Amino acid sequence: MTSFIFEKKQISVYPGASPDAPVLYVNTVKEESELLYQALQNAAASDFALVTISGLAWEHDLSPWEIPPISKNSPPCTQGADEYLPLLTERILPEAEAQLGGLPAWRALAGYSLAGLFAIYSLYHTALFSRAASISGSLWFPGFKGYVRSHEMKRTPDCLYFSLGSKEAKTRNPFLKQVRQDTEEIEAFYKGKGIDTAFFLNPGSHYTEPVRRTAAGLAWLLSR
């Protein structure tokens, strides 16, 4: 593993056995990077390279547009995705792949919670990723379901993975209680377009085993 820091973001690069292995990009938190790599080594049946990006200002870097706090204890989301995505694709990605030393067979973008929302949103703004995984993704985000239906992706992805915890929609919060319905409708929309999709419901809440769930989503992408 090698690492570098770019504009306060920590990038960890885990090479595959082959320099042309598929590259999985995951926006995550620093303490989960090594755990995710180890979990994916156990879960995946094929070669891969993993690039994790941490040190993110989540409610800014990963939000496609502004929304006010959804509860009294949550911060607002401040529309930074369109600033962060070019940083990821034009600066971080080339540096990471220079360290891998080859041309990847394909690239995927994945993430948990707001990073799962960002993974799907990014497909409408870049053609660099041909697969994506939204694990416990914030697809309840106001206006996102309409955005999905009214905009065109930069390329048709090979496959898309979605998952949620079984208890995530069991809340009084008017935004979060829609997450399962919204996720299932978005997944069905893509499936209706002929895209290879999957939706998995995992036991537990939003905070149950995020590393294992993320590794499972990435392993599914690698299996297609």
Image (spheres, rainbow, N blue to C red):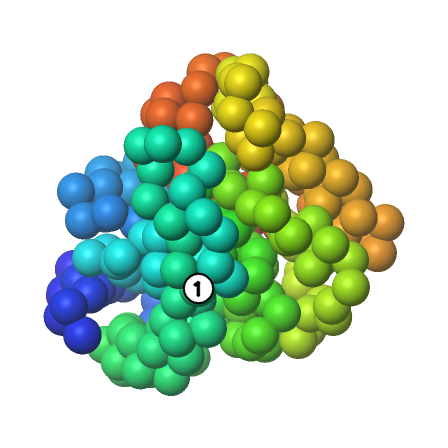
Which image quarter: residue 8? bottom left
Q: Position of residue 30 (x, y in %)?
A: 18, 49
Q: Where 70 sits versus 114, above or below? A: above
Q: Nearer the viewer, residue 89 or 19?
A: 89
Let me know if residue 23 appears in the view: no
Q: Residue 2: horizontal and vertical position, in percent?
A: 14, 65
Q: Residue at x 18, y 74 (%)?
A: 7
x, y (%) of residue 124? Answer: 62, 69
In the picture provided, is 81 more to the left or to the right than 194? left
Residue visible at 46% across and 37% down? 70
Q: Horizontally, is 188 left or right of 65 in the view?
A: right
Q: Is residue 28 left or right of residue 175?
A: left
Identify which amino acid the numbered label 1 is placed on. Answer: Gln
Q: Is 7 placed above or below 132 here?
A: below
Residue holding disc 1:
79
Residue 160: % across, % down:
63, 50
